[in-house]
Image (cartoon, helix red, strand yellow):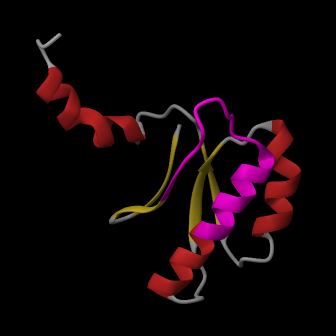
Amino acid sequence: MICLWWLVNGVEYWDILEDDSTMKASNYIAQLRQLRLHVELSRGKKSQDLLSTRQRPSHVASYKAEKSGYGWTVLVHPLYSPDFKPSDYHLFSNVQRHLQGKK
């Protein structure tokens, strides 16, 4: 599984999970910490807005506790929305065109 964290200009941080793993709260928090480091290195420690899809109930408590110390504003966004195309559309559209009609 590929996990992507986007900013306005593109992918800021990505991680690949093992084939048989799922996105657990601990994985989510670890990625959030890595994202924070990347953002601070590239943009400084100023306040950031984080657009987030709905969280799984098991992630919510640890997620809220973690991001509260970051000074980020979290903007909740529906998982499926006409405003944004899924990440795989942008990431894999060229691969799909290349493989179209091939077996």
Vertical position of residue 79 compared to residue 15: above or below: above
Q: Horizontal and vertical percent for residue 64?
A: 82, 59
**Residue at position x 59%, y 77% from top?**
37
Q: Quadrant of residue 53?
A: top right
Q: Horizontal and vertical percent for residue 73?
A: 66, 69
Q: Nearer the viewer, residue 90 or 8?
A: 90
Q: Which residues are magenta?
A: 14-34
> Do we see residue 78 in this rendering?
yes
Vertical position of residue 93 compared to residue 26: above or below: above
Q: Horizontal and vertical percent for residue 72?
A: 66, 73
Q: Nearer the viewer, residue 12 or 17?
A: 17
Q: Quadrant for the C terminus, please.
A: top left
Q: Quadrant of residue 75?
A: bottom right
Q: Is residue 34 left or right of residue 26?
A: left
Give the number of marks: 0
**Residue at position x 11%, y 12% from top?**
101
Q: Horizontal and vertical percent for residue 23?
A: 69, 40
Vertical position of residue 47 compared to residue 90: above or below: below
**Residue at position x 58%, y 87% from top?**
46
**Residue at position x 23%, y 34% from top?**
93
Indicate yes or no whether the magenta region holds residue 42: no
> Do we see residue 85 in this rendering?
no
Vertical position of residue 63 compared to residue 67: above or below: above
Q: Is residue 51 left or right of residue 73?
A: left
Q: Is residue 8 left or right of residue 41?
A: left
Q: Quadrant of residue 56?
A: top right
Indicate yes or no whether the magenta region holds residue 27: yes
